[in-house]
């Protein structure tokens, strides 16, 4: 890291992590991103209301995600099928859910791709509570 900072002339993390500038080796960049992600999860940044920091870091492919809340108990496989998204990707962007379902009366948020928000609203109607600007 010290060599990268000296080479870049800055401690600005996005600059240091930029793969085109190649200040850090790819494995080091991945490692730093993982550490930051775990720190954000530990601080609960990815799931805070009105905070889009997690959305900037966490993406579904090339697409941003939006957190929503379900008021019913439903399995992730069923949600994935209804929203027409890949189950394994949905599970991956919802690693905070320990089980394969959203518990009843839970404060847990469900992350979905922004492109599926309208479909989510159509299916789940009035029970939606999205915390995003989309």
Image (spheres, rainbow, N blue to C red):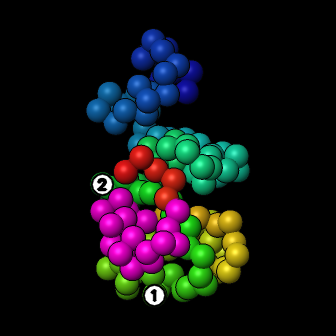
Question: Dot 1 lies on which element?
Answer: helix
Residue 128, how many percent across, how many down? Answer: 50, 68
Quadrant of res 85? bottom left
Q: Position of residue 53 (x, y in %)?
A: 52, 42
> Which portion, as a residue range, is magenta?
112-129
Label 2 and label 1: CA atoms lie apart by 23 Å
User: Number of callouts in the render?
Assistant: 2
Magenta stretch encompasses residue 15? no
62 lies above or below 124:
above
Is residue 50 something that shows in the picture? yes
Residue where numbered disc 1 is placed: 78
Q: Residue at x 61, y 84 (%)?
A: 73
Asked whether residue 37 appears in the rendered view, the answer is: no
Numbered tag placed on residue 62 in the rendering:
2
At 52% from the left and 72% from the top, the residue drawn is 127
Most common SS among magenta residues: helix
39 or 48, which lies in front? 48
Q: Percent x, y for residue 124?
A: 45, 77
């Amino acid at each position: 890291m010290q060599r990268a900072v000296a080479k870049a002339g800055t401690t600005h993390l996005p600059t240091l992590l930029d793969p085109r500038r190649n200040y850090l080796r790819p494995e080091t960049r991945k490692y730093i991103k993982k550490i930051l992600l775990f720190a954000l999860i530990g601080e609960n940044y990815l799931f805070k209301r009105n905070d889009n920091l997690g959305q900037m870091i966490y993406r579904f492919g090339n697409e941003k995600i939006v957190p929503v809340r379900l008021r019913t108990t439903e399995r992730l496989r069923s949600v994935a099928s209804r929203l027409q998204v890949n189950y394994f990707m949905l599970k991956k962007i919802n690693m905070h859910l320990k089980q394969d379902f959203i518990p009843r009366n839970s404060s847990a948020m469900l992350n979905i791709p922004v492109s599926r928000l309208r479909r989510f609203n159509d299916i789940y109607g009035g029970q939606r509570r999205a915390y995003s600007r989309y």
